[in-house]
Amino acid sequence: MTITLQSLVCDRWVAPEGGLVEIASAIDGRPVARASSAGLDFRAMVDHARTVGGPNLRKLSFHQRADMLKALGAYLTERKEQLYSLATEAGANRRDNAIDIDGGLVTLAAFASRGRRELPDTPFISEGEVESLSKRGSFVGQHILVPRRGVAVHINAFNFPCWGLLEKLAPALLAGVPVIAKPATATAYVAEALVKLIDESKLLPQGALQLICGSIGDLLDHLNGQDVIAFTGSLETSEKLQAHPNVARHAIRFIAERDSLNAAILGADVTPDAPEFDLFVREIVREMTAKAGQKCTAIRRVLVPRALEAAVIDALKAKLAEVKLGDPRTDDKAMGPLVSRAQREAVRAAIATLQSEAEIVFGDPNACAGDGIDVEAGAYFAPVLLRAREPMQARLVHATEAFGPVATVLAYDDVDQAIELVARGEGSLVASLFTYDDAVAEQMILGVAPFHGRLLIVDRDDAAESTGHGTPLPALLHGGPGRAGGGEELGGLRSVHHYLQRTAIQASPRRLAALTGTWSRGAPAPAAEVHPFKLNFNQLEIGQSIETASRPITLDDIEHFAHFTGDTFYAHMDEAAAKANPFFPGRVAHGYLILAFAAGLFVDPAPGPLLANYGLDNLRFLKPVSPDDTIKVKLTVKQKSPARRPEYGEVRWDVEVVNQNGEPVARYDLLTMSARPAA
Ligand code: NAP
């Protein structure tokens, strides 16, 4: 049965009013769905996102939105089989679906957990340290990041209907910005099913997510400078959208992930019997065949030392000859079809272009076969390997992306030439290098890094655990300069920042502390009436401080500490040797002794609401402490954050240790866990 895809508009599923485009099964050309966005009110969608979705999301803190993503991931994981079976129609077998569907769910979970761990439970983020802007310290600066008051428009490519949607959705929702998603029409039935599950979960607030199946109509005309467009697809489409007059007029933030002529390079040090040789061959074949080569990160250019060109081609041919084509519904081991027959024609046309500079050394673009498959009605296409005739003269090989199981071998004469060839791709998402030689690795890494968002170095030490050339990871950057679009997705929380506005706030330390909930030097620090360790998390106030009594540090203390701990470093034990050291006036106290005495000065010994000290941050020893110096400590509540368990709260204390002249000798943040009684 052919499904007519619906769009999710202003929290209602809406059927198209006409202009239906038929989407055929990749397996046998049967119609599987029809799509159109005719009749959709794009202005209303934008208004709904701005007036309903945005405010609903911004009512939640970063932690609440992270919890929402976590719950959504769990909900979808239980129901992912529905998506698996639907996605086979797009040519994806179980292994391909693991990349798209499970990959999307892993990314969602990764953002949920990072949001919890790395973002504050506040409506905005303070970024970096307070910047000192004045002599007396009464005027300081701080960058903050606030959710934009617009909508995130996500336009996706056909090859990852789930991962593409989720890897963009997670950072936008975490940031507090509602999304209008527009999947590629060729696989929109998978994306529609995913959004139907998300909608049924009722886990997102109203207006947080809308979906367009079909074209985007006049959507871009309704956007403004608070909005963000995140696009994945071809260079041509991205160029068109970026040149849209309204996008240019409002300087709408545009994140582009587009085609890329990714390279894999075999190091000049590698011999045919080295483990790196086999690893290289295996990775090329894996990248050519996973998702039938329809991955933006797939290896398109295979760079090999000239002396190994024939050996590499022979090894690749032998492996590629083992690749079978098969029906993705029943065969997990074989390679499935391309997404559509139109895509197959596009791949054939790209190969024809490449042939002006390269010869086919394996495969035939017009012939393929497999058991139990209809190679004519389906979009099956067997791997094709080419060899560049004159790599240094070639131009099209570095600019033509055959988006299928296709790669071209290019021979190079030395490392500089390999770097030059890689750079001719004018910017790619990823390159991988196979070498066991430190000098080759360093020269290649520094030579090609400016042209890439990610570099993978594979050798016998990391191969077993390597995540592979083609796998973008939530923790690492996905994107690349130039041809690859200049975008930066994933990369930990970097992609969340795309949906936030960075604003520099210049003010007094008092004003900033009140805004950010973080005390900084120069802000009021009223003396606490009781020892603050006696106060629970709810009772503690930012800026509350105590100043301790003084304590001298004697030579006996230093010697006792040295023998007790075993730290008899000469700077503490030998006056002449210490004096000869450029940093010390003579024997000095151990830094750890200063910390230990500081704790002895500021702790309140009795059991109370302060439960544990779990670390120090930003520790600096600023000035040596000599025998018979005196120290005292100022302890100030710097920041409070609720812990994941509601009965605890994390407290960050500013600790400053000063000597008898009031000069700071050590500064650090002390991290403690305090009891947090139910309010
Ligand atoms: P595409 O033809 O450029 O389409 C990408 C998206 O743009 C689709 O949703 C498409 O919708 C939409 N679109 C096309 N023309 C448009 C227009 N005039 N106005 C508004 N939207 C428009 O790319 P594709 O064929 O889907 O994907 C393959 C390409 O994507 C390859 O080049 C691949 O390298 C690249 N890719 C890059 C990455 C990455 O992360 N860098 C990831 C995956 C894919 P319709 O489908 O409705 O036309």
Image (cartoon, rainbow, N blue to C red):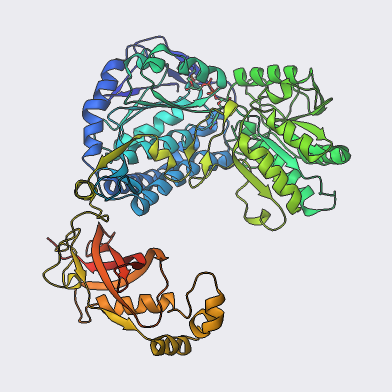
Q: How many marks?
A: 0
Please tell me which residue lies in front, 635 or 522: 522
Residue 114 is at least partly visible in this image: yes
Residue 395, by quadrant, is: top right
**In the rendering, at what x and y percent does residue 518 appear?**
25, 53
Please tell me which residue lies in front, 673 or 632: 632
Horizontally, residue 185 falls left or right of residue 123, namely right
**In the rendering, at what x and y percent does residue 339 appear?**
58, 26
Residue 473, compared with residue 211, is above or below; it is below
Residue 327 is at least partly visible in this image: no
**In the rendering, at what x and y percent does residue 41 appear?**
29, 15
Please tell me which residue lies in front, 471 or 338: 471
Horizontally, residue 506 falls left or right of residue 294, namely left
Residue depicted at 62% across the width and 42% down the height: 332
Residue depicted at 65% across the width and 33% down the height: 262
Residue 627, compared with residue 201, is above or below; it is below
Please tell me which residue lies in front, 348 or 224: 224
Looking at the rendering, in which quadrant would you find the N terminus? top left
**In the rendering, at what x and y percent does residue 673 appear?**
27, 67
